[in-house]
Amino acid sequence: MKLEKVLVIGSGALKIGEAGEFDYSGTQALKALKEENILTILVNPNIATVQTSEKIADKIYSLPITPFFVEKIIKKEKPQGIFISFGGQTALNCGIELYNSGVFKKNNVKVLGTPISYIIKSEDRDIFRQMLINRGINIAKSIAVNSVSEAIDASNEIVFPLIIRSAYALGGLGSGLAKNVYELKKISSVALSYSSQILIEESLKGWKEIEYEVVRDIYDNCITVCNMENIDPIGIHTGDSIVVAPSQTLNNIEYNKLRFIAIKIARYFNIIGECNVQFALSNNSYKYNVIEINARLSRSSALASKATGYPLAFIAAKLALGYGLHELKNTVTKLTSAFFEPALDYIVCKIPRWDLNKFYGVSTKIGSSMKSVGELMSIGGSFEEAFQKGLRMLDLGLYGFINPFKNKKNIKSVIKILKSPKYNRIEVIEDALENGLSVDNITSITNINPWFISRLENLFKTKKKIKYYYNLNHIPYELLYKSKKKGFSD
């Protein structure tokens, strides 16, 4: 069927957990459709976005992204196809509701890209778990429940501590770690206010969190565009974690094993376009568990796209229209095929930005529910360089990892903060090094991989060497050269 008109459900309002990254995805999808001379209809109530700018979409409806309004637009515009995977969880949930109520079938609207039946399976925590188990893929022990009483019953089968997670929710809304029945009741009540289904899951707190961005076409061609590693361990939401691409602490066996499984999952869920697969990986063995799959463009997809120069959203939109990877060019490089996996000879860091002082009474502790309001990306020839660049770009008055003018914390308060991390935990790691804590000590408290802590220790040691000199002109050339390569500013 030749598509003449396609409706795109946009990114909607900017809010914690769902922000500008989905504006980017939607904009790229609209450009891909325009290139095919397809009339584009956009529904997005947020006028402060790129996708609502002039000449991006042919027609814009500034209406709330709800089934009621989107159904009215469908009846009026009569599009042949619809994109529901480019506007974040809000767009996806709206699309699922419209599908379940029969609106798409009644109006002959085709959901483009990954079949919606598989999207629903990936979003339903219980079905998702059973599908992976049937394929012999490891996933944490969990039970899907629909009430607080069922959650308490589930805790008799899975040992505390437990992770509580909501289905069909973004940014870890309502999720949390319960160490006892009282906390389980409290967190479950909150989680059920966001979703009718919640997952009671064994805790993997302290494991590494690894992500893969997988692209697949209708011919079953698959590539992994990028893999990423969270510096913070499982237990801290990936939106609040510092992320590095490519991964730095995986060996060849771990990297290829998880890559193989990510592609296997993409094929099993019949992904057409792009998906994000998240893993928990043990620090002491090759044991892994799948956390989830996002059968849509995600927060990590935007990072991977900009980190690698591979236009994920644009390519995903083309694949949803029926193209194969071998038929598409990478629109960024202009030379390579879309079937070409990017290889990075640089390091990319994603660092979150918080403004918790604007929210009175909000805890500064971070965990499984996202609290950051934005993020930045920095690039460097080494982890240290990219990391320090990123910290300076946060616009918080930081000089990088090393900040000579702040007050030193005592060892007791340092250990307390590291055990129960806050948004400023990276600054506290410097205090820990200043107080004489070793790499192994800090690793055992934070569960951050010792590779990352040792790199921060290198920055700390370099700072101590620089402190011996009164000004820039007195620093020996070799030390200055090494310092600049490690990301120290003037």
Image (cartoon, rainbow, N blue to C red):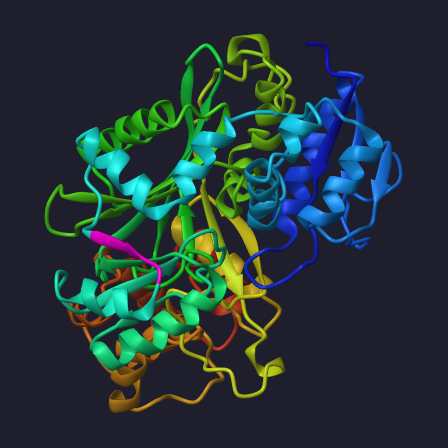
Residue name at image x 59 percent, y 29 percent:
311
| Residue 6, position as x, y percentages in the image | 74, 26
Image quadrant assignment for residue 287 = top left
Q: Give the range drawn in magenta.
A: 142-146
Residue name at image x 50 percent, y 55 percent:
170
Residue name at image x 39 percent, y 45 percent:
124
| Residue 128, position as x, y percentages in the image | 32, 40
Residue name at image x 39 percent, y 56 percent:
197
* Image-based side of 198 in relation to 296, left or right: left
Relative to the observer, which residue lies in front, 223 or 473? Answer: 223
Q: Is residue 127 above or below residue 142?
A: above
Q: Quadrant of the N terminus?
A: top right
Relative to the observer, which residue lies in front, 364 or 159? Answer: 159
Labels in figure, total = 0
* Image-based side of 117 in relation to 458, left or right: right
| Residue 320, position as x, y percentages in the image | 59, 21
Q: Is residue 73 magenta?
A: no
**Main SS category, magenta section:** strand
Q: Would residue 235 be visible to someone looking at this image?
A: yes
